[in-house]
């Protein structure tokens, strides 16, 4: 408060007893010499002001339009409640909406034996019977369900130690570390590996967990076209030549982020070429094998084994236990120095609660089955069944005239719908035929590249696949989804396997072009 302003005068001013200074500098009254227009007493003008003027809009106009006019109309295709094991078949709770999908009410009915073509149950370990279920049950009786502490305090169990040693042996690396959440394995560990002064080169179609981890790291991020080695090499060359912005100092570290199988595209990373570029330009490679571990390779070793590469050529091997192993959580494998560093610097390691004991046991048992350490050939049989199912399902869809994306060996099979209006129609028509599918649209994909995404499982029998294919073909005719210009093969009454001579004549895999 100015020294000439007394407490009483301030009170008068606030009560409106104030005086104005005239234009010639004289005051109409010299009571303490204050003026009404003093900055301390000016009130903000409220006329014509909207309440939201001072705030950044929460949503973009187009996103608001999309949510109101499209998403809400087809919202019934997502978040359907499942009331059984998500195996080859599942049970769904029936829902109904009286307000155009703003709210849903359960009718009390259960839709039985819906064929599950959407879950990431690649090797069929999502089950409530068998060796894995029995081992997890026994673990629950022995350890309980929760740990109630972090690994650094009272939450480090012998199960966790056994799991990490098994994962390291499975991957062929020196050491590994397990985490309780797959998403956090990426988003919380990348910031521990890169920071200010580092450069991250990320594939444009990387998963949201990789994108979030890169942003949280504070590193400079540059994006290269999907699976495009020319684009990646150009960014690497520019990074070496020009260095950091403004200072032109060399980058502290260059980290390349890629996935094994891209979950919306079904494409497999061109790993041999990525490794060659990484070695040439002295960069580090972070490989996310969430969808490829257990699903690719003759022994389920993922994309590294699929290409016959040395695991030592990949600096950071990441993967999740949520797909092929029917559990939860994730892992990071690599050199012992890397894992020791993450144990003391990763937020996910220091602050997160330990993995649940029955979940750990589920992973251990399923991984031993895959590796053949259980004394049976069950793992080998499941791996072969998944490979055969994938090849058969993709070939049949292509013969029917559908456009599908991805590699022939990828169990993730995106089938193009293109039109956003066909998302809801396809999902509903398939459910009418007792087939559960995943339909995908904006913002997960470009708005005119809507698709249905099928996930093939070793648990699917040939009869189940034939039933699903027949329904897909029928719905494809109704909705006019058979866009392919290749010559179509008429669907026979029996969708049995073809001879080896016919298999040799099948058309080559459709490879999705890079999305600009």
Image (cartoon, rainbow, N blue to C red):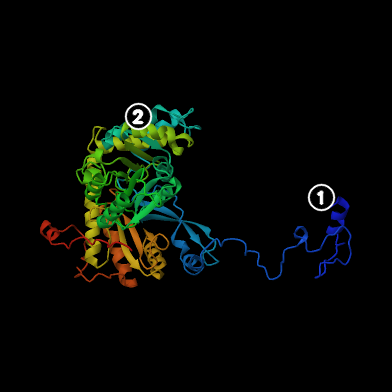
- Residue at mark 1: 3
Badge 1 marks a residue whose secondary structure is loop
Q: Are marks 2 and 1 in contact (CB under 8 Å)?
A: no
- Residue at mark 2: 162
- Relative to 454, residue 46 above or below: below
User: Is 50 left or right of 289, judged from the image as shown?
Assistant: right
Q: Residue 157: x, y in percent?
A: 42, 28
Is residue 300 in sight in this rendering? yes
Mark toward the start of the polypeptide (2 vs 1)? 1
* Residue that protrudes farthest toward the left in the picture: 501
- Relative to 95, residue 281 above or below: above
Q: Residue 69: x, y in percent?
A: 49, 70
Please tell me the numbered disc located at residue 228. Answer: none
Between 8 and 59, the residue placed more toward the observer is: 8
Instruction: Please report the residue visible at 65 percent of the width from the left and 64 percent of the height from the top.
Output: 51
Q: How far separated are the C-alphas under marks 2 and 1? A: 75 Å
How many numbered marks, from 0 up? 2
Q: Residue 340: x, y in percent?
A: 37, 31
Is residue 267 in sight in this rendering? no
Q: Residues within 10 Å of mark 2 (few under 14, many from 20)?
A: few
Determine which quarter of the picture holds residue 287. top left
Instruction: Please report the residue visible at 49 percent of the width from the left and 28 percent of the height from the top.
Output: 153
Between 15 and 3, the residue placed more toward the observer is: 3
- Relative to 457, residue 425 above or below: below
Between 119 and 494, the residue placed more toward the observer is: 119
Badge 2 marks a residue whose secondary structure is helix
Instruction: Please report the residue visible at 33 percent of the width from the left and 72 percent of the height from the top.
Output: 478
Q: Residues within 10 Å of mark 1 (few under 14, many from 20)?
A: few
Label 2 or label 1, whichever lies nearer to me, is 1
Between 316 and 477, the residue placed more toward the observer is: 316
Determine which quarter of the picture holds residue 473. bottom left
User: Is 259 left or right of 15, judged from the image as shown?
Assistant: left
């Amino acid at each position: 408060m100015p020294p000439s302003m007394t407490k009483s005068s301030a009170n008068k001013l606030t009560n409106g007893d104030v005086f104005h200074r005239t234009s010639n500098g004289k005051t109409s009254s010299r009571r303490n010499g204050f003026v009404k227009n003093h900055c301390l007493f000016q009130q903000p003008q409220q006329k014509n002001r909207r309440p939201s003027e001072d705030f950044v809009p929460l949503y973009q106009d187009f996103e608001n339009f999309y949510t109101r006019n499209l998403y809400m109309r087809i919202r019934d295709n997502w978040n359907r409640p499942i009331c059984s094991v998500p195996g080859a078949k599942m049970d769904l709770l029936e829902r109904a909406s009286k307000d155009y999908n703003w709210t849903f009410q359960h009718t009390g009915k259960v839709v039985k034996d819906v064929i599950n073509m959407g879950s990431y149950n690649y090797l069929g370990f999502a089950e409530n019977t068998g060796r894995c279920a029995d081992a997890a049950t026994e673990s629950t009786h022995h350890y309980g369900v929760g740990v109630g502490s972090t690994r650094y305090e009272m939450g480090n169990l012998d199960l966790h130690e056994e799991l990490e040693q098994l994962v390291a042996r499975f991957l062929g690396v020196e050491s590994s570390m397990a985490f309780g959440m797959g998403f956090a394995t990426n988003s919380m560990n990348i910031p521990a590996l890169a920071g200010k002064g580092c450069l991250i080169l990320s594939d444009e179609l990387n998963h949201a967990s990789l994108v979030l981890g890169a942003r949280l790291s504070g590193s400079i991020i540059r994006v290269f076209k999907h699976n495009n080695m020319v684009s990646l090499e150009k960014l690497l060359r520019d990074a070496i030549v020009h260095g950091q912005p403004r200072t032109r100092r060399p980058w502290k570290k260059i980290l390349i982020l890629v996935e094994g199988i891209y979950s919306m595209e079904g494409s497999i990373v061109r790993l041999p070429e990525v490794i060659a570029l990484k070695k040439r330009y002295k960069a580090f490679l972070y490989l996310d094998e969430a969808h490829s571990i257990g699903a690719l390779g003759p022994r389920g070793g993922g994309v590294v084994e699929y290409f016959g590469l040395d695991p030592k050529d990949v600096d950071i091997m990441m993967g999740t236990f949520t797909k092929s192993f029917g559990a939860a959580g994730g892992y990071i494998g690599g050199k012992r120095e890397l894992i020791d560093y993450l144990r003391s610097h990763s937020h996910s390691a220091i602050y997160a609660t330990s993995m649940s004991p029955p979940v750990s046991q589920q992973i251990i048992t399923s991984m031993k089955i895959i590796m053949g350490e259980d004394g049976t050939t069950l793992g080998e049989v499941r791996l072969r069944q998944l490979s055969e199912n994938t090849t058969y399902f993709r070939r049949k869809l292509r013969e029917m005239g559908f456009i599908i994306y991805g590699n022939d060996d990828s169990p993730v099979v995106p089938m193009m719908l293109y039109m956003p209006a066909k998302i809801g129609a396809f999902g509903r028509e398939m459910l009418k035929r007792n087939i559960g599918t995943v339909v995908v649209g904006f913002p997960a994909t470009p708005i005119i590249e809507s698709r249905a995404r099928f996930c093939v499982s070793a648990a699917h029998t040939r009869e189940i696949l034939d039933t699903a294919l027949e329904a897909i073909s029928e719905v494809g005719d109704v909705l006019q989804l058979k866009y392919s210009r290749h010559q179509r093969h008429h669907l026979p009454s029996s969708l049995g396997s073809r001879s080896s001579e016919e298999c040799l004549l099948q058309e080559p895999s459709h490879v999705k072009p890079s999305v600009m």
